Amino acid sequence: MSAIIAAPLGNGLSASASTANPWTMVPPLGNLDAYITAINRVPLLTLEEEQGAARALREHNDLDAAGRLILSHLRLVVSVSRQYLGYGLPQADLIQEGNVGLMKAVRRFDPDQGVRLVSYALHWIKAEIHEYILKNWRMVKVATTKAQRKLFFNLRSMKQGFKAESDDGNAHRDTLTEREIDVMARELNVKREDVMEMETRLSGGDVLLDPTPSDDGGEAFGPIAYLSDASQEPTALIESRQRDALATDGIAQALNGLDERSRRIVEERWLRVNDDGSGGMTLHDLAAEYGVSAERIRQIETAAMKKMRKALAAYA
């Protein structure tokens, strides 16, 4: 948790650790509970102290004054972070991001506007936490536009409110009714279609395209198995072109290297297809035509095929 305090204050601003007073540094701690206990012991600033520190920072770039402003508001970040624990992200990370927002707020705070830092910093703290949640809650972003972000952070709480008000006795109902969709769309000033789309996005889970193998050594099945198109893979395309070339020009060239009888035997035995789907002549048919035995035809065929394989290998 010491990383939460050691983070840069933003825009070149960093907390001073040169003195030992409690305004400049919370001691490095080993766990979140100890960190929260420590920052709750840091006293709050009065209005006069806050404005004095803010002016010292703006006019003289007083880093000790910045440290006092930040440390006195760390408990605010912890309080805000608790509102976002339902997204399944570590509270320590939420606090870390909220502290970054607090540091940005301190850098931009104008004490002459008549607003306390606690009110001004709230926006910056939530903005940083929102950005962190949107980037890390899902592998795929679920909200990109301003309206979608508003839906994302209000849909969950509004659904819980509808469940609490529901009198149908079904406390585990997850789907929104038509009336609830209309209420959300009206209160958030968005379209009904946007509410339904965001509800669909939030209800779905992430699916790994290429899951890791199971513990028992078996192959895990994922969408990558049926989403990938192997036919357009470069190596497969090259191999396909090579096969096409061998099946046309390569075979034609290999046949040209045979004598007339060997060529006809190969064509009749392997390349001839009749209109009825049957093949060419049999060994015995060719033996009768050439006046030799079927075994001799087989020998000529074997020698011709061997010669053709050499020619095809040279062609490839």
Image (cartoon, rainbow, N blue to C red):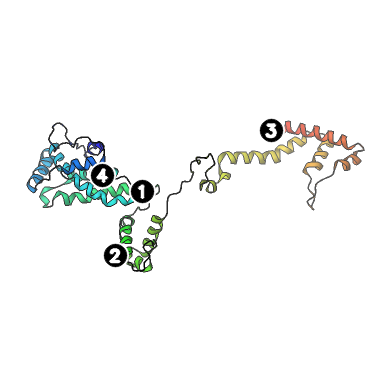
**155 or 66: nearer the viewer:** 155
Q: Residues within 10 Å of mark 1 (few under 14, many from 20)?
A: few
User: At which x and y percent is residue 165?
Assistant: 31, 66
**Can residue 62 be seen by looking at this rendering?**
no
Q: Which residue is mark 4?
A: 95
The kind of residue on which mark 2 rests is Glu
- The quadrant of the image that shows the N terminus is top left
The kind of residue on which mark 1 rests is Trp
Up the image or down, 88 lies above or below 297; here it is below
Q: Earlier in the sequence, mark 2 or mark 4?
A: 4
Q: Which residue is mark 1?
A: 137
Give the Cα distance between marks 2 and 4.
30 Å
The kind of residue on which mark 3 rests is Tyr
Give the SS element for disc 1.
loop
User: At which x and y percent is residue 39?
Assistant: 18, 42
The kind of residue on which mark 4 rests is Ile
Give the Cα distance between marks 1 and 3.
56 Å
Q: Name the residue: 15% across, 39% down.
A: 67
Q: Earlier in the sequence, mark 2 or mark 3?
A: 2
Of marks 2 and 4, the one in the foreground: 4
| Residue lying farthest to the right in this orientation | 291
Residue 68, picture quadrant = top left
Callouts 1 and 3 close, C-beta under 8 Å: no
Which disc is residue 187 wearing?
Answer: 2
- The quadrant of the image that shows the C terminus is top right
Of marks 2 and 1, the one in the foreground: 1
Position of residue 244 in the picture relative to residue 289 (left or right): left
Q: Earlier in the sequence, mark 1 or mark 3?
A: 1
User: At which x and y percent is residue 125?
Assistant: 23, 48
Q: Which residue is mark 3?
A: 315
Q: Residues within 10 Å of mark 2 (few under 14, many from 20)?
A: few
